[in-house]
Each structure stands twice: as C-alpha cells, then as structure tokens.
Amino acid sequence: MIGKIKELEILSSVLTPSKGERQELMNKIISYTEKFIDDIPNDPAYYFSGNEITGLNPDFIFDEEINIDFLLKEFSNKIVKSGINGASGAHLGYIPGSTLFHSALGDFIAAVTNRYAGVYFASPGAVKLENNAVKWMSSLIGYNENAKGILTSGGSVANLTAIVAAREAAGLRANDYTKSVVYLTAQTHHSVEKALRIAGMGECIKHYIGMDKNFKMISGELEKAVTKDKKTGLIPWLIIAAAGTTDTGAVDPLNEISEIAEKNRVWNHVDGAYGAFFILTERGKKLFDGIEKSDSIVMDPHKGLFIPFGTGAVIVQNGKQLFDAYSYQAGYMQDTIDKNIPLSPADISPELSKHFRGLRLWLPLKLLGISPFRAALEEKLLLAQYAYCELKKIHGIKLGPEPELSILTFRYVPKYGDANSFNKTLLEEIHKDGRIFISSTMLNGEFTLRLAVLSYRTHLQEIDMFISIIKEKIKQLSSI
Ligand SMILES: *Cc1c(COP(=O)(O)O)cnc(C)c1O
C-alpha cells in the first residue's frame, strides 16, 4: 500500500507547481492580461461577427497536458474576442460592468489563500471583513445597527434572498400564496418575478401599479391598490420599488412608498442593483430620500462599484428576519455554533461554502479610498446629461425622460417610413460597426434605443464617439 501511495503522490505532484513553474505561468498570464489591458482603447466594444464560435471542443477536458501559450491563444480568440467586450469603456448597453484591476488581484489573493468565508469559526477574519463591507453599505443606505446582509453572486440572487426573508417574516404558508399581493411596475426588473417563482410564490397576485410619464411608480395608485386589496380580504405583502430601473434609470418615489408600506405593514423592498451606489453622490442622496426606511435593499458592487461580475449585496433592516429565514442546524456544524460570536454569511443566506468575495471589494476600496469611486459615479451622471444635450441637437431624435441617473432612452423618427424598423436597422448597423455597444428596449410599444453609462472606463471621449457614430449611421441610413 505504501508503494502505491508514494506512486500516486508523484503522479499528483504537478498539482503543486514549483516556484519556477509558478513564476513561468504568472509571467505568461500577466503578459497576456497586460496586453489585453493595453489594447482596450483600440479593441471593439462588440465583436459582431464573432458570435458564431467554431472549434470550442465540447470534449473539453483531456487526459494529456496542454501548454499555457496554446490555452491563452484559444481563450483570447474564441472567448474574449466574441460578443460584448465587458472591459471596454465604449460598452454603453444593458448595464455595463467594469473590470477593476485591483479586484482581479483581490480574487487572486482570495483563491491562493482560500479562507473559508462562510462561517466565523472557520475564518473569523474573512467573515469579519465581509460583514464590515456589508456594514459600510448599510451605513451608506442609512439603515440602523440591527441591519444584516450578505454579499451574493449578483442582484438576482440578492433579490431572491430578500424575497424569501419577506415571505418568512410575513409568516406566509402555501395556502396564503394565491391571496398574497406583490406591488410592482411594468418596469420592475425581471429577476423579481423569477425570484417569486423560485421562492414557490409564482401564484401570488402581481399588482402592476401605474407609472407617470417618467416611468416612476405613482404612489397614489399604490396606496389605493393596497387599501382596496386589504378590504377584499387579500394579503398586501410586498412592494418592490426601484432605486434606478434597468430600462430607463427611473427612481421610484421612495419616501412616499415607504410611508405607504409602513402604514399598511407591507414589506418595502428597494431594488437598487443598478443605481444604489449613486448614493455616494449628492444627486443620488437627494433622489433616494426615504431609502433608509425600506425593509430591504439590493445593491450590486459589480455594477455601481465597477468590480468584475460576481458580487451583489442584500441588506435587511431588521437583520433578525434574515436570520429567521436562513439559520440552520446540523450535527457536523456543532463546533461552529456559539451565541457570542458574530453571525456568519451561512447563518443568513442560502450558501455554505462560498467564494471569499469580500476581498475583491475590500482590496480596491482600501487601496484607493472611496473618493475616486464617488468621482467616477458623479462623472457617469454628468456624462449621461451631456449625452442627452448632444442627442437633443440631432434633428429627428426623440428623447425619453431627462436622465436622473446614468441611463437615457432615445429613437430616431425618420421623415418617411416606419420608425420602429428604422431604429432596429440603426441598432444593427451600430452593432456591425462595433466601436460602441448600445442596446434597445420597447417603451410604450416603441422600439427604443438605450444608452447606459456605468463603466469607470467611459469618459467624454467615448460619449463623443457615441454621438458621432449615431450621426454617421443616421446619415448613412437616410441616404439609402
Ligand atoms: C442588473 C439588475 C438586476 C439583476 O442583477 P444581476 O447582478 O444581473 O443578477 C436586478 N435589478 C436591477 C434593477 C438590475 O439593474
């Protein structure tokens, strides 16, 4: 047996590379990532033709070794050079993400050290670091000391986490679901309805509240709906308000909504996945007045704090409600349970073993301080306003509401022909061109183009390029 064990030790020893081997791998990977970063300004924002990828072998894991040079080349050609370039400052569609370098280094340290950030007993430091990150976000929102939250993989899971906490806090059971009412708008992010279904509450009543011309929930209608539903024996349970909708960046009247929620004892959830970090700016602070009175909030550091994909956050004002929904018991976990130690992510979330995702947030915030983030967010707000003014100057452009945050909508109305099909073609031409990337939506039945500014790499230069490309493509299409 000992002979076999030693043989296996030798066979598996490549899992522990030597110093020299590590250095060689790091050098090659760093030289690739450095080149990638240097090329960003000249690379397209969208690889239109790269959408049909050939040669990515589905029998992807082989028995033999493959060298790093080949793998990096494959990765670059088949993965990085296709679809949307998530690192580009000219990515102005959907909600753009960013690729903060300091976060990448945080991920590297997290993976090398592999602290177990799910349970305090296993890594008090890692859990404290993550709890402190959440505490900081909680204080930005203005929640009190009892608030508790976690870092999630993103906004969708964060919304789900809050919705399950709201369900448990209301004491709802299966036979209540068809009488339970959720108040939302047609602009609520789809992850909310998805979460309701995952939470087993797909059959609850969804009461869509009307919106004003700026796509904000009309609080008077909300109040009437809640009062009426109560009278007819339904259970007004949950209000979903947006601190910046994905489609148009509209901020619902959070203060009025929180008053209605409080008066009627309905859970008030704010989806701030896109917009909540604008609370770091003066404008955001004013717009989000009343946000501190909500019961729960979702905010995505992988949107508003520019870190790479994989980190959202959810915070519940009365943290006990999160604990009540997610705490657990198991014999093999007995060493980890102690009333005198801080709550762990595992006590208040669906996860147990998890990525130490706090580090990708902690490292950049500690290294750089908060002021560059605040400046970048203020810059995004101004860039959206600047784009709005510049688009206004283009004859034939019809604009949506003036941007409150960093998203705006617009379409071109040609003198002759169908505006919907014109804008579809316009978008396609922009995508084929690839220098910038924007996306589209349907608003009031109209095919509408969207500009969303949220990458730290987006500056005046990219917005000017966007304006000139819009002008160029309109001219080109109008002359056909
Ligand atoms: C992006 C977004 C979500 C979903 O978040 P993910 O991180 O993509 O899962 C939810 N709500 C709003 C308002 C969003 O913008």
Image (cartoon, grey):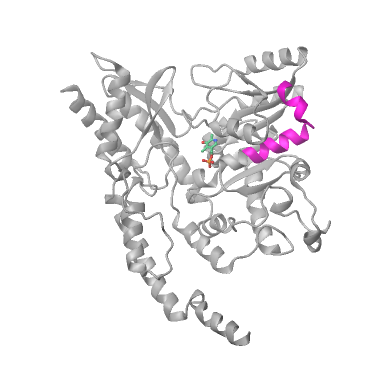
The residue most toward the right is 339
Q: Quadrant of the C terminus?
A: top left
Q: Position of residue 178 (x, y in %)?
A: 71, 22
Q: In the image, is residue 460 above or below residue 99?
A: above
Q: Nearer the viewer, residue 13 or 134?
A: 13
Q: Is residue 217 magenta?
A: no
Left or right: 105 in relation to 136: left
The x and y percentages for residue 149 are 68, 46
Q: Based on the displayed image, in which of its 4 quarters is residue 362 positioned?
A: bottom right
**Residue drawn 66% across and 44% down?**
138
The correct choice, above or below, for 33 with respect to 258 in the image is below
Residue 329 to residue 385: above or below: below
Q: From the viewer's perspective, is 323 left or right of 269? A: right
Quarter of the image for the N terminus: give it: bottom right
| Viewer-nearest residue: 132 or 9 | 9
Residue 196 appears in the figure: yes
Q: Could you say where residue 450 lies in the image, as x and y percent from the top left? A: 39, 30
Q: Which portion, as a residue range, is magenta? A: 160-179
| Residue at (50% x, 64% y) in the render | 108
Number of labels in the image equals 0
